Image (cartoon, rainbow, N blue to C red):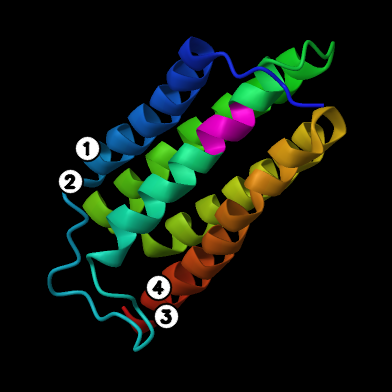
Amino acid sequence: MFQTIRLKPLAVSIGIALLAGALGALLGGGNNLDGITSPWFMPPAVVFPIVWTILYVLMGIAAYLVYDSGSPQRKEALQVYVLQLVVNSLWSLFFFRLHWFLFSFLWILFLIVLVCITIYQFNQIDKKAGYLLLPYLIWLLFAAILAFSVYRLN
């Protein structure tokens, strides 16, 4: 009934997700929006690293469940997962460093599509893995609204 948790692959999986987040933060250059008009519903800056850390840990756990499943579909699912991690990391560069707000909005829509594909593929392999990515999808939908609002205001 209970699955044995293999700590090393779990730690590696969470570490990969957190490294993707750190890469995004580096590319974003400190999430600088000085002089940029933000929408009234923009959360305080302190919220973002907390939420993203939680989301990356959940992503890592989900990826571990798929990796550890032994499913023949896990390779393809994990490839899409890694692709969405890369797309996610690059978004910070476009939005925060380059201030390409319209492009960033379109890029996050692309990311949302990739995450939906990842959720579908993970769900086919391990339902828990698919469910663990739902908070990420919800946050991305909110982030897309924020990105579009920043584009419109600037």
Q: Is residue 130 depicted above or below 45 in this figure?
A: above
Q: Is 99 in front, or is 47?
A: 47
Asked if the residue under mark 3 is in contact with the one under mark 1, i.e. CB atoms within 8 Å, the reply is no
Which residues lie in the magenta part? 59-63
Type of the residue with mark 2: Gly
Badge 2 density bin: few <14, some 14–19, many ≥20, Cα 10 Å: few
- Alpha carbon separation for disc pair 3 and 2: 22 Å
**Mark 4 — residue?**
151
Q: Amino acid at mark 3?
A: Arg
Work out whether residue 113 or residue 50 is closer to the camera in this orientation and state it: 50
Identity of the residue drawn at 80% across and 39% down: 127
- Residue 136: within the magenta? no
4 or 1: tag closer to the N-terminus: 1
Mark 1 lies on a secondary structure that is helix
The outermost residue toward the left is 34
Say few, some or many: other residues with alpha carbon within 10 Å of mark 4 (under 14 / 14 to 19 / 20 or more). many
Q: Which amino acid lies under the numbered mark 4 shown in the image of this protein? A: Tyr
Closer to the chain start, of discs 1 and 3, is: 1
Examine the rendered structure and indicate whether residue 135 appears above or below residue 72: below
Q: Residue at x 30, y 32 (%)?
A: 23
Report if the CB atoms under discs 4 and 3 are less than 8 Å apart. yes
Q: Which mark is residue 29?
A: 2
Position of 23 relative to 49 (above/below): above
Q: Residue drawn 64% across and 45% down?
A: 132
Residue at left offset 17%, top offset 46%: 29
Question: Can you say whether 37 is above or below 97 in the image?
Answer: below
Q: Which mark is residue 152?
A: 3
